[in-house]
Amino acid sequence: MPFRTITGHHNLLDLIARAATRGTLPPSLIFAGPEGVGKRTAAVALAQFMNCTGSDMRRMVPASELRWDAGGDDSCGVCGPCKRIARGVHADVLILEPGDTGVIRIDQVREAVGRAAYRPFEGRRRVVIVDDADTLNVEAQNALLKTLEEPPAASTFILVTSRPDMLLPTVRSRCQRLRFGRLAPADVAAVLMHGHQYAEKDAHAAASLSDGSIGRALDEGSDEFVTAREAAAGLLESVAASTDPRRRLEGAKALTGAARGGSDREELARRLHALSSILRDLGALLSRADERCLANADLRPLLERLQRSFDGERTLRAFSAVDRALSALDRNASPKIVADWLAFQI
Ligand SMILES: [Zn+2]
């Protein structure tokens, strides 16, 4: 996909595209950053960028698919090379990834290194993408060393990893490391809606608990996120303006309500994470943070209602109580006791 249809990481992608246009992009790169934020997608986009034969992408890509535009060149996404790279069948773009054994075998590396020694068959540049590069064992990393140090002309190597520290220092020192950050909640929600057909409500609920990772949002069912957030919102509303102990106990009950999947413990943990996500937003609103930083921007009316009862001090106190509740749960405390305790702390 063209860089400009990728959600998030605009500055970094713009930098990569400009360097590739000028021919100043180092030939050995590490794309590092959290799991599930689009590092591999960006690596494939770079391979397309360097081999695209189409014309001006801004005329080729429908405006509805453009996520950003900083000017400058981009791939078209629709020419033969762009399409073959996206399907993983372009002769000059190799993607190495771990197989069933969970590691990238040394013979995969040797084959890629061997092929990279020849000039590209059909494109302008040969690109070798090593996904989950941290699964290369020491021997396989050593087999890559010489090539990373002096890549053959017209070849680019991209090591994609969420654990760059698992790579040998000798490998790291031969590559330019580019850091991908977490995505803003609004960006995760946008990807879930546009790329994975989530309904708006489900997308925002999943994004609010995804910690900026699309991978993480997709791992969990969106139903669970929605339920967790509703339970958390229910507790906050029932304790917001009332000191009545009965209401608090009812709120606690809502928090430990029937688990829809997994154990009561997992369900309560999910709801506690939802609680801290909402409380974090309340804190952000108090400090007048940008709307895009809010994980639960779609719950704006709720947040505004809660703001009337939650000042800075109460929000902070509640936030740290949720944190303590999560650690107690980790240490095997009973979910019911944890929820009852919490309902009287916030
Ligand atoms: Zn193209």
Image: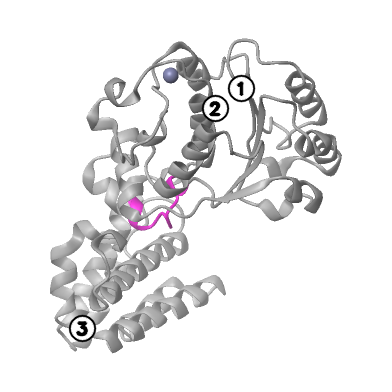
92 with respect to 167 (left or right)? left
206 with respect to 45 (left or right)? left
Instruction: Examine the rendered structure and indicate whether residue 208 appears above or below residue 117.
Output: below
Identify the residue at image location x=42%, y=14%: 79
Please tell me which of labels 3 and 2 falls first in the chain.
2
Q: Amino acid at mark 3?
A: Arg
Disc 2 and disc 1 in contact, CB within 8 angstroms: yes
Q: Quadrant of residue 110?
A: top right
Disc 3 and disc 1 in contact, CB within 8 angstroms: no
Q: Amino acid at mark 2?
A: Ala
Task: Count neighbours of disc 1 (C-alpha within 10 A) and say few if under 14, some if 14 to 19, many if 20 or more.
Answer: many
Q: Where does the magenta region start and end?
A: 206-216
Q: Looking at the image, which is closer to me, 346 or 82? A: 82
Disc 3 under 8 Å from ligand 1? The reply is no
Q: Residue 263 colored magenta? A: no
Secondary structure state at the residue bearing disc 1: loop
Tag in front: 3 or 1: 1
* Residue for badge 2: 47
Identify the residue at image location x=43%, y=71%: 335
Residue 234 in the image: state x and y as whole percent.
22, 68
Task: Count neighbours of disc 3 (C-alpha within 10 A) and say few if under 14, some if 14 to 19, many if 20 or more.
Answer: few
* Residue for badge 1: 125
Identify the residue at image location x=31%, y=39%: 69
